[in-house]
Amino acid sequence: MITLPEFLDGTTPHCTPTTAHLFDSTHPDDEERAAAICAGCPLRPGCATHALTTPEERGTWGGLTAHQRRRVLNPDDGAWLDEQGRVRVPCGTFPALMAHLRYTETCGRCEAAQQARTASRRLARLAEEHEAGGTTAGAAIHRRLGERPCLRCLAAEARRSAYRRAARHMAQQQAPRPELAMAS
């Protein structure tokens, strides 16, 4: 069980004895619920500062899980705490974009960087599809990139369409036709 620090004596934090198990749990759902309880607490910044200055090795403190506190104390990715005590990482990275989304914020720099990463991955995948001689997946990637598919990718789509058409035609020919009965 987590022992409350002295600075919390005489105050009314949002965490209560009925929710204490959430703050000591390492299950992601419990950590998320504990952080949500901390989100509106007026003591959140002080609680987070306490957990960072006093080596609290486990539990959720001030909305920060043990993992998040380790990241702040040993930042290998430039992480820091903002004024509200939330973990932040430099903009332009995928983790920063996820943090902005989690905090319901928009960031043009993070969104532009994500679009560039996505386009780069699509271009690399398109090159692989072209090495295979053009594919239907390549045609779809061309369209996602906003361009007309190349001839090899269009030809692959045409082959797939012809194959499906032939399979459908064969299935219709092989299907037994019901006999029509005469009404008496």
Image: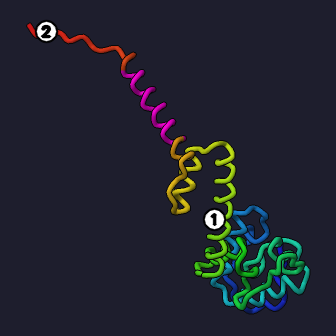
Residue 105: x and y in percent read 59, 81
The secondary element bearing badge 1 is classed as helix
Above or below residue 119? Residue 149 is above
Residue at far top of view? 184
Q: Name the main secondary structure of what is drawn in magenta.
A: helix
Magenta segment includes 33: no
Q: Residue at x 61, y 74 (%)?
A: 101
Question: Residue at image x 89%, y 87%?
Answer: 53
Residue at 69% x, 49% y is 128
Q: Is residue 97 left or right of residue 162?
A: right
Disc 2 crowd rating (10 Å Cα; few below 14, some 14-19, many 20+) is few
Please name the residue that numbered disc 1 is placed on. 119
Q: Which residues are magenta?
A: 156-172
Screen quadrant of the N terminus = bottom right
Task: Specify the amino acid type for callout 1.
Answer: Ala
From the image, which quarter does the C terminus lie in?
A: top left
Q: Position of residue 144 (x, y in %)?
A: 54, 59
Upstream in the sequence, badge 2 or badge 1? Answer: 1
- Looking at the image, which residue is at 64% across and 78% down? 100
